[in-house]
Image (spheres, rainbow, N blue to C red):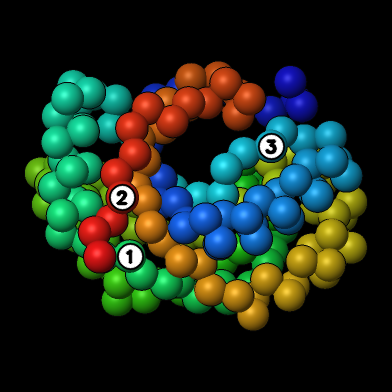
Amino acid sequence: MHGLPEADGSVLWLKPDQKSAAYFRKWIYRLSEQYSSPVFEPHITLSDDVSSFPREEVERALEEAARLTRPFRLRCTAVVCREYPYQKIIVKIDLSDDLAEVYKTIDLVFGGSYSKKEDPHLSLLYSSLPCDNLTDSVKSTEEITTHELHVQFISLISLNGTPDVWENKYTVNLED
């Protein structure tokens, strides 16, 4: 489907509150329709593969992470195109103190270096098209840099296959 490689494993996503999700979903849907690409939920990938852990252990770790983490806001800094299919058009995210704290919490509750600390971003388009074909779309999304992303949830996502079959397996709400 869509010429994208299949993914596998399970990862953790930071997911926005309803208002932020609706805003970013609008852009994801618009680009998906324009380029016949898959639709996916707005998110920031929080971890590397955690599929080596038993599901119950992951759920307990997420509950503990949610207990230790409050909802927070992230600043969008730029919209860029990349050559990676699952990171074609992305919104770069500022590495704030709150985000750094979430990385530490994930590493703590999983007992190792599992958080994906480099290159925080939110993808807007998954595609195998070259960036030269997407220049106008990148420019049209630049208004995104005036918005903040309000993080409210952490989810366990099964990535077995292409985005149309990725599954949300478990979600925790960050405590206020």
Q: Residues within 10 Å of mark 3 (few under 14, many from 20)?
A: some
- Which quarter of the image is occupied by the C terminus? bottom left
Of pointers 3 and 1, the one earlier in the residue sequence: 3
Give the residue number, with chain letter if any, for mark 1.
Answer: 71
Horizontal side of residue 73 vs 163, given as left or right:
left
The answer to whether residue 26 is visible is yes
Work out whether residue 65 or residue 7 is closer to the camera in this orientation and state it: 65
Q: Amino acid at mark 3?
A: Val
Q: Residues within 10 Å of mark 1 (few under 14, many from 20)?
A: some
Q: Position of residue 38 (x, y in %)?
A: 71, 33
Q: Which mark is residue 95?
A: none
Q: CA distance from mark 2 to mark 1?
A: 8 Å
Label 2 SS? strand
Of pointers 2 and 1, the one earlier in the residue sequence: 1
- Which quarter of the image is occupied by the N terminus? top right
Q: Quadrant of residue 165?
A: top right
Q: Amino acid at mark 1?
A: Pro
Horizontal side of residue 96 vs 82, given as left or right:
left
Q: Position of residue 128 (x, y in %)?
A: 76, 37
Q: Residue at x 37, y 27 (%)?
A: 169
Work out whether residue 173 or residue 136 is closer to the camera in this orientation and state it: 173
Q: Amino acid at mark 2?
A: Asn
Q: Which mark is residue 39?
A: 3
Give the residue number, with chain letter if any, for mark 2.
Answer: 173
The answer to the question of whether label 2 and label 1 lie on touching residues, with beta carbons closer than 8 A, is no
Label 1 SS? loop
Q: Residue at x 78, y 42 (%)?
A: 32
Q: CA distance from mark 3 to mark 2?
A: 23 Å
Horizontal side of residue 22 vs 66, given as left or right:
right
- Tag nearer the camera, 3 or 1: 1
- Tag nearer the camera, 3 or 2: 2
